[in-house]
Amino acid sequence: MRSNRAALRAGASMAATLPMIAGALALGIPAAHAADSPTRDTLAGTKPAWATTKADKGSTSDSAQVSARVYLAGRDATGLAAYAKAVSDPASPVYGKYLSAQQSQARFGATEAQVAAVRSWLTAAGLKVTGTTRHYVSVSGDVAAVEKAFGTQLHNYTKGSRTYRAPSKSASAPASLDGAVLTVTGLDNAPHKAASKDQLPPPDAVFKNSGPFSSYYGSNTASTLPSAYGKKIPYAVQGYTGKQLRAAYGAGGYTGKGVRIAITDAYASPTIAYDAATYAKAHGDARWKTGQLTQVLPSDYTRTEECGAAGWYGEETLDVEAVHAVAPAANVTYVGAASCYDDDLLDSLSKIVDNHLADIVSNSWGDIEANQTPDLAAAYDQVFQFGAVEGIGFYFSSGDNGDEVANTGTKQVDTPANSAWVTAVGGTSLAVGKNDKYLWETGWGTDKASLSADGKSWTDFPGAYTSGAGGGTSRTVAEPYYQKGVVPKALATANSAAGNRVVPDISAIADPNTGFRVGQTQTFPDGTEQYSEYRIGGTSLAAPVIAAVQALGQEARGGKAIGFANPTIYSKYGSRVYHDVTDNPTGSGLAVARVDFANSYDAADGLLTSVRSLGKDSSLSAVKGYDDVTGVGTPANGYVESYRRR
């Protein structure tokens, strides 16, 4: 299961992160199938880490029902990873020589014979095949049949206060299949389980910001409020618009014309077309043309209550409006998942790759690395590798909880942003001044202190940590080649002497206190549904902004796809095409004043006044050079144009 990346409005998540299967993430390429007997191959990572001897409560009933997916390795998994690397590397002789979706399947996908062999093996064990795609064969059946097929026993295990089913040892497949099986998911049921078809709920309750506001950074000083860091501070901006963001990140005259951007989230806002059109008209963005915004949606939705379906409407709205604000001529395809669970999100990503729906894919969702398992990591990475081969780049928000210690008690990064095959997008606090002038950025990290009862001071200044850009060092994904020589050794080796993946790669505006204005239909207290606007942030904002900037870059290079961008992004490291973002860029502390409605929509229940200090991201710091808050930095004037020279 995944949560929608916390798009921040009031400095708190729109939806809480939901639990997912615990485990450890393996390498960023499909795991090898090691032989566990002369006749069977082990499917590494299919026994979750929480299925321990101590937690074992005995065998699962033979009659219990199981639904699983058997992911196909294809005809050349090693070759797929190698070509995905080569075609994305500017130093490679095959750089940019992408394959079509049909060519990539013909060269690396599963053969008809492999699919037939896998189906035959599963049905012979007594399982019912419920579906077949290019990527997997789905099956259902009782525990006895599953145990026969996968060569393992299913037991019940305690995990926290609950009990779940899981394999007692790693699953395996017949060696006669000759490595046709990549992995299997669904043998455990924490929390993957059957679900009924649901109707989408109405929009969430209204959220609105109270004023006073600044129209640009520093335009309105909070002269009647206490000072912070020895000076009077400005009110938070009402929310930047596309014109300000385009100026900050060097859009120039580029608009993303001819470029296709896809956005993935769960569910689908029923008012997205109206909201996007209304917002564009209100803020001077180009009018949406007929067919410029399309949606690819599932036939049915599930787990709407469990996943907080209405909370995803705001996510989709933010992503669509932010992309259009920065790249107003790009074509946008929204691909909604049937739920927030991994299988459904993987289906959405696979639709993009299988049909080459776009060259650039923005994804504002994820979960903590500890909740990832090697089987799912392999399935995700295979999709990302197919994308790279076709010239498709995936951009994932890095998270909104800094080092995750305050959220989980453990220092860790988020996933899928930790994959070596995606571009992880971190977050900043952005100051855009008068006449749309870029002033500075800090790493996004917020401390909050409230106004005292007498209005003369800030209580416990600078206050408690609330949120910040996700980043840090993966515990399980090896350091990719493109980070070597750029990422400081101390970061790369924080969890392994051999070096691991560090997040993020690049960054953009994310701080909700210097955030983006968005327009969305919401449910008001009287039950009516009305369009209204509010300021929003989170790396949910940073990801679509970077995706849009990449669309400008693709336009600059004559429309040729950038593909998996990390090798190119790191090849520009240290040049003037990036803002090298550091905390406290002005040399003195930075903060803004905020006034919020106590009830989130009007002043009937009073106002809440606070000071938000900037550049305070948990244990993470934005420093000169590469750092684990902002990566190589943010796009500057010249970044978009730099793609023209390639």
Image (cartoon, rainbow, N blue to C red):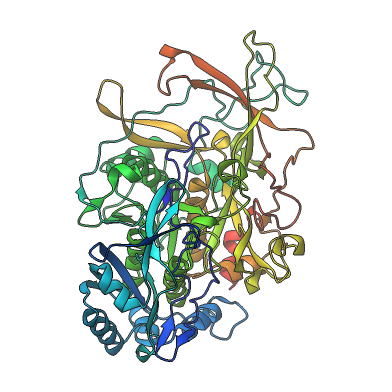
Q: Quadrant of residue 138?
A: bottom left
- Identify the residue shown where x is 26% and y is 56%: 194
Closer to the camera, 31 or 108? 31
- The answer, for residue 442, to whether it is visible in the render is yes
Front position in the image: 239 or 317: 317
Query: How far across and how far down the image is residue 4, in percent?
Result: 42, 47
> Which quadrant: the N terminus?
bottom left
Asked if residue 637 lies left or right of residue 388, the reply is right
Query: Which residue lies at the image location 70% right of the left edge and 28% below the top edge?
Result: 462
Extreme top residue here? Answer: 454
- Left or right? Give the position of 430 relative to 60: right
Front-most of residues 492 and 640: 492
Q: Is residue 281 above or below residue 63?
A: above
Residue 512 in the image, given as x and y percentages of width and height = 54, 36
Which corner quadrant of the image does residue 245 belong to?
Answer: top right
Most extreme residue toward the front is: 58
Q: Is residue 579 above or below residue 276?
A: below
Where is residue 488? Give x, y as percent: 75, 62
Q: Residue at x 25, y 74 (%)?
A: 145
Indicate the position of residue 471 as horizontal and vertical percent values: 62, 53
Q: Quadrant of the C terminus?
A: bottom right
